[in-house]
Amino acid sequence: MSLDALVRVRRGVMTVEVPLAVDDGRVVAVLGPNGAGKTTALHALAGLVPLDGGHVRVDGATWAGDGVHRAPEDRAVGLLAADHLLFPHLGALANVAFGPRSRGVDRRSAERRAREELDALGVGDLAGRRPSALSHGQAQRVALARALATDPRLLLLDEPLSALDPATRPHVRAGLAARLRAYAGMTVVVTHDPLDALTLADHLVFVEDGRVVQEGSPAEVVQRPRDPYVAQVVGLNLLAGVGSGTGAGDAVTTALGPVVTRDGGADRDAWVAFAPSAVALYDERPHGSTRNVWSATVGSVELVGQSARVRLLVGAAQTPLVAEVTAGSVAGLRLQAGTRLWAGVKASEVTSYPR
Amino acid sequence: MTTATPGASPEHGAPVRRPRPGLSRPGLSRAVLLVPAGLGVALVVLPLVGLLLRTDWPRILENLSAPLVWPAIRLSLLTTLATVAVCCVLGTPLAWLLARADGRAASWLRAVLTVPVVLPPVVGGVALLMAYGRRGVVGAPVLELLGLRLPFTPTAVVLAQVFVSLPFFVLAVEGAMRGVDARYDAVAATLGASPLRVFTRVALPLAGPGIASGAALAWARALGEFGATITFAGNFEGRTQTAPLAVYVALQNDPQAAIALSIAMLAVSLLVLGLLRGRWLR
């Protein structure tokens, strides 16, 4: 029992084409920058946007494609958007009972079901409140209860936490994660927040300009990004390179010149990745064990607690790299935009893998 | 240019115009705005004051009991209520469909529905006669098949009022319904709500205040309807003579009855305005 979809929707000059497969009880996260087509894909699954090609099949039944287009009300979906979109004229309980009532359940059963859903998300005591009397976090939980109260086969979450303030987001995220573990159906969550994706999902799909650029398990993606956007999301420096193809220990040629890596240049087409924290900064060219040294210019410095993210433009091609150094180094090296310095990465900190 | 000689512009060497003694320039320019504004207010308020001053207040109840007054008021009340009912029943779904439609057809329909708003009511009456009259496009077959004659009946009064007030209602309600976030429709649909249920359970409650004010607007328009009514429905006492027609007739032979009826209609209009504004009287 599963979702098997190939969403193809034309949107202006861009065509969104995203294949998605989700099994029961699994959560797939779709990540991508704004305008990548994530929400369009989600709306196509819900039936709010017609397909221009491809198909949506759930448990073997065709919801869309092959000349079929089931209306949203004829699909077993639940949708939760960034804005809770609770009906302002109904109380929390009536909002949650709206779905079952719309699907023909009698009032008493619908309200009992609504109460169970609210209790499961820890907001049962708010049943009588109007949405205007709920905090953002509470409203989002009520909205999740509403989406689940119809027993959807497919739960669609569209940036479910992005509208919440940073203080409430972790609580709602934890509640959402716990509820999703108990949910038997399939979930597709669209987000641009890597933390949402890593904590909620079993499988990540990265979409850029309507196309899938990488997918895999969170662990796999975090270790081996294969796309600049993915690398940025998981916080790694990523370079495309060409190896010698002959054996380990050789350098991989990248936009920064030859890069000596831990794994060597065994692959012809290779990705080279290293963490920002592996990048050391010097005001003079270092002499020592560091094998990869480049001259660089500071683009910007952003202090986060005791450490700083330094955006660098490296080498002749001004390749962007990110370094993470201590606040002490920022002061010691007097880092500011335009500062010229040297960046070094030890070979043991650099991984390479086939492209 | 940090220092400038008073009365002279350092760039051009031409003298800067000094403020004229007496009326200062800001005061003058304000007066230029105030005079037309005040005249405008006077043009609206003076007739109302005149009506109030010329009313024979001690004998107003007596004047209101003139024979033609009560049937006219009763007919006006019944027909305008019927008109508002027709507007609500037919106009609300129409407004909803228009609010959610985006296409050339919807634009054209909206334009056609606006015509009665700008059309002289008498022309509307003529058009109604051509449609529902004895030889009208609809009137002739209705007369032949059902033996029903529409013109010069209370039904004709309602038809005339609907013709002029339905557009007001639809445009007002459509505006309110456009204000209902379309994402609510989408969420309701994913929850399993049919389009009809979305209309009744989401659109109607959320546009409720807009529908109420649209109904009040339509009712006020119907209450004042004169031209289309007298052209299409005639002026028969007790059958088609609504309050505005009665005022017009009474003015010729019983001016105090006309004034009393006018005062009654003014009071009712103010009441509607107060309901519309909510806190108007505070």
Image (cartoon, rainbow, N blue to C red):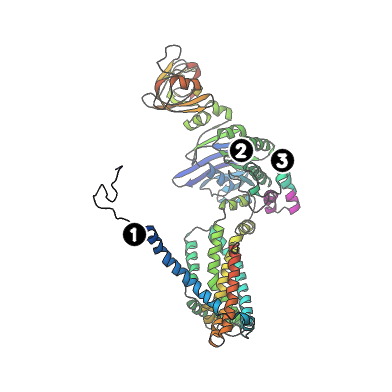
Foreground tag (1 vs 2): 1
Depth check: give the residue in front, A260 or A300: A300
In the rendered image, the vertical position of residue B240 relative to residue B205, given as above or below: below
Residue at the outermost bottom position: B253
Question: Would you say the residues marked 3 and 2 are in contact, meaning their CB atoms lie under 8 Å apart?
Answer: no
Residue A94 x, y percent position in the rendering: 69, 51
Residue A45 x, y percent position in the rendering: 58, 45
In the rendered image, the vertical position of residue A188 relative to residue A219, given as above or below: below
Q: Which residues are magenta?
A: A84-111
Residue at the outermost front position: B21
Name the kind of residue labelled 1 in the image: Pro
Q: Do dots 1 and 3 share one subunit? A: no
Q: Do dots 3 and 2 share one subunit? A: yes
Please, which chain is the residue tagged with disc 1 on? B
In the rendered image, the vertical position of residue B251 relative to residue A133, given as above or below: below
Residue occupied by mark 2: A22
Residue occupied by mark 3: A120
Depth check: give the residue in front, B93 or A25: B93
